[in-house]
Image (tube, grey):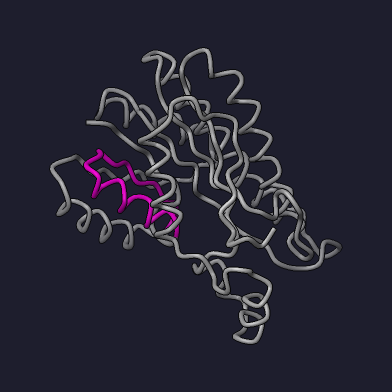
Amino acid sequence: MKTVLVTGASRGIGRAIATAFAKAGYNVALNCVKEKTKLDRLCEELRAYNSGKIIECVGDISDPDYVRSMFEKINQEFGGLDILINNAGISIVGLFTELKDDEWRKICGVNLDGAIWCAREAAKLMVQKHSGKIFNISSMWGQVGASCEVAYSATKGGIDSLTKALAKELAPSDIQVNAISLGVIDTEMNSFLSQEDKEALTEEIPAGRFGKPEEAAELILSLCEGNNYLTGQIIRMDGGMI
């Protein structure tokens, strides 16, 4: 039975991804930093789907020491890791000139540092088995940029570069690294938008609606179970927006 780790799994896209993999029969390790109650409830739900093992890993992935301990736990529980989904992320909305020093450090810590620490530890385990997949959750704003989300866009641009570079380094070990570049997904991250803003944004999307977390989860699951030659790709799912 294969094992997957999903970071930022307590809600939104991470929750949908964890649910999809549990239903498909995987062992699932779930990470979050502060929504432990939500993670507890999700674990109970997932345990009803299959005979695989579901474990919780509560901690801050921007801390490399925590990440090392999390992967040690996963290795002890499952004897390795087959798939890493770097999903954890936060957004900061506001004028770039008003961006605070600690806000920049925080968004880099979660969105970029966390993905790097997790990918580094996952790669160590995967190289030993000469197999594995790493999927990074990116955003279309990492490719085209978003006004008033400069810091977020910068971190997602970094995720895209991480994906392409790491894919080249790990390909000889038969490890695939790809990213899903998402458009506007209907999650709590977009809860700051007013109804008027949501309607205006919807009009810009050729598909005429926000994406669903479950749609992102279905795509990632299908890619993880399929082609082992696909690597280094930034795969867009944005309803045709860019």
Residue closer to the observer: 132 or 115: 132
Q: Is residue 190 above or below residue 227?
A: below
In what quadrant of the picture does the C terminus appear?
Answer: bottom right
Task: Please tell me which residue is depicted at 66% across the width and 46% down the height of the picture.
Answer: 108
Q: Is residue 213 above or below residue 179?
A: below
Task: Please tell me which residue is depicted at 25% across the width and 38% down the height of the picture.
Answer: 27
Pinpoint residue 140: horizontal percent, then vertical percent. 66, 54
Residue closer to the observer: 62 or 213: 213
Task: Please tell me which residue is depicted at 54% across the width and 70% down the height of the picture.
Answer: 210
**Callout count:** 0
Task: Please tell me which residue is depicted at 78% across the width and 60% down the height of the picture.
Answer: 99
In what quadrant of the picture does the N terminus appear?
Answer: top left
Residue closer to the observer: 66 or 45: 45
Question: Is 76 a magenta residue?
Answer: no
Q: Which quarter of the picture shows residue 29?
A: top left
Question: Is 17 a magenta residue?
Answer: yes
Which residue is the extreme one toward the bottom?
196
Pinpoint residue 235: horizontal percent, then vertical percent. 58, 44
Pinpoint residue 72: horizontal percent, then vertical percent. 36, 27
Which residue is the extreme one toward the right?
97
Q: Is residue 105 above or below residue 224?
A: below
Q: Which residues are magenta?
A: 13-34
- Is residue 93 found left or right of 137 in the rendered image? right
